[in-house]
Image (cartoon, grey):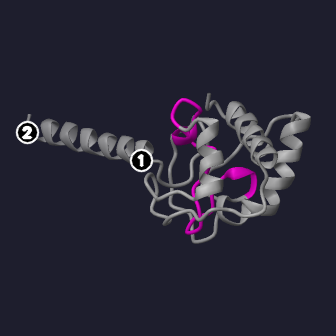
């Protein structure tokens, strides 16, 4: 009987740990599968499914994102371990980080509050139209990955 209780307690502890890691956004995950591992420095943080086709505005946003944001946020906004968080993550869903939050982050920078990458500096050289297009790009990818 005691052995059974110990096995159950260990199973609950492991399940709780897995849930905690998944909720904290740690590691690489494929949306929907719950698997998590820790990527190496500079590696992509999450697996991202891409839309079959982007809108015209999102295509413009992709070009601007690739020119300014990819260095930290990774290709297709999948994050880059040690550099910047994935924007294709439930933390950045529209109900938690509205489109205006992206605009303010670009204009003013933002203090680190969800991740331990340090503060994001303001980004020079992007117009409001550029940021709107970048947000359209990110939102279209988020939708394909179930982040609405």
Q: Residue at x 78, y 54 (%)?
A: 65
Point out the residue furthest to the bottom here. 41
In front here: 63 or 23? Answer: 63
Residue labelled with disc 2: 2
Q: Residue at x 70, y 45 (%)?
A: 48
In percent of width and height, residue 21 lies at 40, 48
| Label 1 secondary element | helix
Q: Residues within 10 Å of mark 2 (few under 14, many from 20)?
A: few
Q: Does residue 94 lie above or below 86 as drawn?
A: above
Q: Does residue 42 lie above or below 112 as drawn?
A: below
Asked where in the image residue 146 lies, by quadrant, the reply is top right
Q: Residues within 10 Å of mark 1 (few under 14, many from 20)?
A: few
Q: Does residue 19 lie above or below 63 as drawn?
A: above
Question: On the picture, is 145 further left or further right than 56?
Answer: left
Point out the residue furthest to the left here. 2
Q: Is residue 78 magenta?
A: yes
In front here: 113 or 73? Answer: 113
In front here: 2 or 11? Answer: 11
In percent of width and height, residue 84 lies at 59, 61
In percent of width and height, residue 105 lies at 60, 52
Q: Of the two numbered discs 1 and 2 on the same chain, state the one appearing first in sequence.
A: 2
The magenta region covers: 75-96
| Label 2 secondary element | helix
């Amino acid at each position: 009987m005691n052995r059974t209780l110990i096995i159950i307690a260990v199973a609950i502890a492991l399940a709780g740990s897995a849930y905690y890691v998944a909720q904290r956004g740690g590691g690489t995950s494929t949306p929907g599968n719950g698997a998590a591992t820790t990527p190496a420095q500079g590696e992509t943080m999450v697996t991202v499914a891409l839309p079959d086709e982007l809108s015209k505005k999102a295509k413009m946003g992709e070009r601007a994102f690739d020119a300014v944001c990819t260095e930290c946020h990774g290709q297709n906004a999948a994050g880059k371990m040690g550099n910047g968080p994935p924007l294709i993550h439930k933390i950045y869903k529209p109900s938690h980080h509205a489109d205006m939050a992206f605009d303010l982050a670009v204009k003013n920078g933002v203090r680190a509050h969800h991740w331990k990458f340090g503060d994001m500096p303001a980004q020079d050289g992007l117009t409001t139209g550029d940021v709107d297009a970048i947000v359209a790009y990110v939102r279209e990818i988020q939708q394909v990955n179930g982040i609405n």
